[in-house]
Amino acid sequence: MPVDASEQTIRRQGVSTAEAAARLGRDGPNELPQDQRRRLPRITWDAVREPMLQLLLAAGFIYLLLGNLAEALILLGFAVLNVVMVVVQETRTESALAALRELASPQALVWRDGSQRRIAARDLVVGDIVCLAEGERVPADSMLLEATNLQADEALLTGESVPVRKRPGAGQAAEDLPGGEDSPFVWAGSLITSGTGTARVTATGPRTAIGRIGKSLGSVEAAPPPLQVQMRSLVWLFATAGIGSSLLLAVSYGLLHGQWLQAVLAGITLAMATLPEEFPLVLTIFLVLGAWRMSRQHVLARRAAAIEALGTATLLCTDKTGTLTQNRMSVARLAVAGESLAVTETTGTIPEVFHELAEFSILASRPDPFDPMEQAFHRLGKQGLANTEHLHADWVLEHDYPLTPDMLAMSQVWRGSAGGIYVIAAKGAPEAVADLCHLDDAALAALRRDVMEMASAGLRVLAVAKGVHAGPGWPENQHDFNFIFLGLTGLADPLRPGVPEAVAACRGAGIGVAMITGDHPVTALAIARQAGIDAERVLSGQDMAAMDDPGLQKVISDTRVFARIMPEQKLRLVQAFAANGEVVAMTGDGVNDAPSLKAAHIGVAMGGRGTDVAREAASLVLLDDDFTSLVAAIRLGRRIDANLRKAFSYILAVHVPIAGMSLIPVLLGWPLLLGPVHVVFLEMIIDPASSIVFEADEASVDIMSRPPRSPGMPLFSLGLLAGGLSQGVTVLAASLLVFLLGTHTAGGESTGRAMAFIALVVGNLGLVLSNKMLDGQTLAALRRPNRTLIVVSVGAVGALSLALAVPELRHLFGFSPLPLGGVVTAIIAGLASLAVNAAAIRVQRRLSRS
């Protein structure tokens, strides 16, 4: 577009250094706000003020005030350890994200004080004149002043991987949107794929299109993971019940018997037996270790609670470009004279009839291209024309005719080996190339049928033609050459390897997969069918805009393909799915995905291709950009969910006999059976068993063939609650039985206490084994390797042996020496409780299947 002399002067002068400094001080740097970055003090404060951890700290201080130093140190030590583990993990995560931000330091070529200079993009101000070239990122929202064959890839903003043409012109940025053809505006973060240009900066930092999306994240409410909500309610319920029952027992015993010292001791023991300090401990360790395990699968957990939530996800909403697909154009089909050839990455040498079409598609492209479609043609040549005479590395490009709004085709003129004869290659929109070749009506009708067939498969269709020119001189435009039509090429953004298998695995796990894209419905349906996503119907952004929220919620219940969707509509879709009761996991890599990533229960961003805005909004980041890593993450999330249920069932079950053996003797007037020292000893088993043994338990072989846990289903279902209580009652009954047997021996109370404690410890270890059986076959659960269980069992048995054998420890525990028969009886009672619980679990599992 012509520019007058005054505009030329303004362009060459640009903004002065002094004026730029003033504007920079007024508007701030040209960068997105980094509010999401959490420093060490913020991470530590977030970890300490978590209500579940505060309960753990409170329990430790209560025991300290009650004079139980050992128990207090154990709890406070675990609290400090948990804080340290959370801080280390999340600090490492934030550092990794910071490293991703620093992978590229953006620069900009600008006119300042009448001369060109390269500056940091963050120092750009409104009014700066920037120079744009192929392969560079646009540093700020700008309006073109001049351009030559300029095309930009705006996929980060629109979700569409095909570049769009740009040309200078008048307009208002507020009235324009990314993605339009022949727009005079270029947008921060978009990529120049071909041509050059000069543009005036119109907006910087948070005022750019990218910045407005990032700023909108502050108003988006992130959905809390279901486990976190359920856990907080569960912890406060058990804490209230435990403290209340302890106070009630102490007051009642004191009023009934008048023995207030004994009453306080009974209340303290019951409080120690019932306070649920293991719940927050188990949850924290499971999620922190889960984040570590997930990092080994190339998945970075920015928010540990999302790991378990991923295991309960019922719907996976995925972007198309760069997530399901490679964001890299490839030739998918060739068509010549009625013959068609499907091309894949494994295709070898192509048939002879397609050689010339492939040859001239390369000659119509730049020798060292940046445009993704031209790169695809060059890859086709290396793949399908190797060792043929159709590759011409020694030819010289003499002249070219760029694509223009009036002629949507481009031509390149090459000097070959024959002197004086030039070879011309043209490619472009089929209608434009047909016009260059002067096709008759019959040929034109056949061409349109072929184009329609390829377009219906979601392909981007370009036509190719050839010609010769003997010179001298060059015609004014391409129309003056005599072209011969060669055929059609169909290009597509191919699926990532393994995507169909990953989608199938999600379906087998009872997880729905929905594709949300800005692409055309035809392209969206084609990709959905290739990926194995339900493509019975598609909902467009235009149709969606006409619906109210209840209507949208009804339609999306059986729709899994969404096309021509704008960023704000992605957010609305995620919120509608959540309103339908789905636990939503959203994957994406572009700026346009960020609000929906934050609103979803689990946001999953791409670490390599993804933008900073998307990574900061997500709770999980796929470091290798491999969609199939999501299947491993889902499997790990389900393993954590299943093992958490086992651990919590065990915690509930093991507290029943401890609380019962603290409460029943007091109510029945028996001598005290358990004191604080006994409960501390049992904590040596409870804490490592519930937090480490179950966390290390391998997943059941069928874990990915089960439906996810219902979103509304509490962590403790009634069945799991009843099962845990019944297991605990069984161990309690066995322990009380051997206590009564022991009190009738010569040793009396101390013998009964020793036998009951042995039965309780053996039954405790039995509870670990029985709860391992909750999600699989009995023998299979026992055969799954678990080194931690072996260590805990050996340690518990060794410590118990010392307590029974060392006189000083026997006195501390209130035991008397036991004969071999008493030890065997107690062990048999503990093993019998395991047998009863294992049988009950098998019966319960069979009933649930029937």
Image: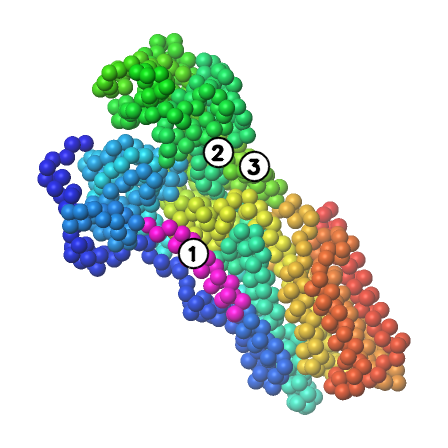
Q: Residue at x 40, y 34 (%)?
A: 372
What residue did someone put label 2 on?
Answer: 494
What SS does tag 2 mark?
Answer: loop
Residue 91 magenta: yes
Task: Determine whether, in the image, residue 283 is placed left or right of residue 517.
Answer: right
Q: Residue at x 53, y 35 (%)?
A: 531
Image quarter where the N terminus lies is: top left
Q: Earlier in the sequence, mark 3 or mark 1?
A: 1
Q: Main secondary structure of the magenta part?
A: helix
- In this picture, is 139 found above or below 381? below
Estimate the spatial distance between the alpha carbons at disc 3 and disc 1, rounded to whole Å. Answer: 32 Å
Dot 3 and dot 1 residues touching (CB under 8 Å): no
- In this picture, is 275 found above or below 458? below
Task: Determine whether, in the image, residue 783 is placed left or right of residue 745.
Answer: left
Q: Earlier in the sequence, mark 1 or mark 2?
A: 1
Circle 2 residues within 10 Å: few <14, some 14–19, many ≥20:
many
Q: Earlier in the sequence, mark 3 or mark 2?
A: 2
Where does the image place residue 707, in percent across and percent down from the top left? 62, 46
Estimate the spatial distance between the alpha carbons at disc 3 and disc 2, rounded to whole Å. Answer: 12 Å
What SS does tag 1 mark?
Answer: helix
Residue numbers of the magenta segment = 83-106
Q: Amino acid at mark 3?
A: Pro
Where does the image place residue 785, in percent across and percent down from the top left? 72, 57
Residue 410 visible in image:
no
What residue did someone put label 1 on?
Answer: 99
User: Residue 500 shows which numbered tag?
Assistant: 3
Q: Amino acid at mark 1?
A: Ala
Q: Residue at x 38, y 43 (%)?
A: 156
Q: Amino acid at mark 2?
A: Pro
